[in-house]
Amino acid sequence: MKDQLQLGDAAFANMMLVLKQPVTQANHKEFKFLDGEMQEIAPDIWAMPAYMTADDAFTMFFLTTQIESGETVVAFATGDQSGAEFRLSAPMITGAGLNLLNDQQPNRAKRVLKFLNDISRADEGDWRLVDQAD
């Protein structure tokens, strides 16, 4: 494996951002991206648009939730509008979601990665390499 994983690399799909604290009603406004703000869509599951425009059917959302280990992670989901119903896809780990966004909208993917790296640099989260079986 390469020493420096980069956005778009197959191995980058195995990167996950683990937050040091869960997103809550008290801190969710600290996680703003562009004009978006985290919204609680189910108990302890928060979502915010990473990419959504009126002229593109492709959409991508940040998701934060706890995994089996009890850690809070940043994941991604795509959105699907079927008639009046809007649904999110099954969650993707951070790197897989970023790679998918990079395939569709490379410039936005770079901005999203910068946002997540800023969270890591602020010591609010850590990047980890995970097995896809996790």
Image (cartoon, rainbow, N blue to C red):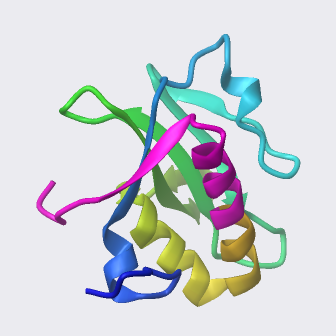
Above or below: residue 67 compared with residue 9: above
Asked whether 98 or 121 is in front, the reply is 121
Q: Residue 23 appears at what percent x and percent y?
A: 55, 25
Which range of residues does the magenta coloring cover? 113-134
Q: Residue 125 appears at what percent x and percent y?
A: 50, 40
Q: Residue at x 31, y 69 (%)?
A: 14
Q: Residue 84 appears at what percent x and percent y?
A: 64, 52
Q: Residue at x 11, y 61 (%)?
A: 133
Query: Considering the image in quadrants, where does the C terminus appear?
Result: bottom left
* Residue 124 placement, left or right of 65: right
Asked whether 125 or 38 is in front, the reply is 125
Asked whether 48 or 113 is in front, the reply is 113
Q: Is residue 10 magenta?
A: no
Above or below: residue 36 compared with residue 38: below
Q: Residue 25 appears at what percent x and percent y?
A: 64, 13
* Residue 112 placement, left or right of 68: right
- The residue lying furthest to the front in this view is 3
Query: Considering the image in quadrants, where does the N terminus appear?
Result: bottom left
**Count the marks: how many?**
0
- The residue lying furthest to the top in this view is 26
Q: Residue at x 67, y 25 (%)?
A: 28
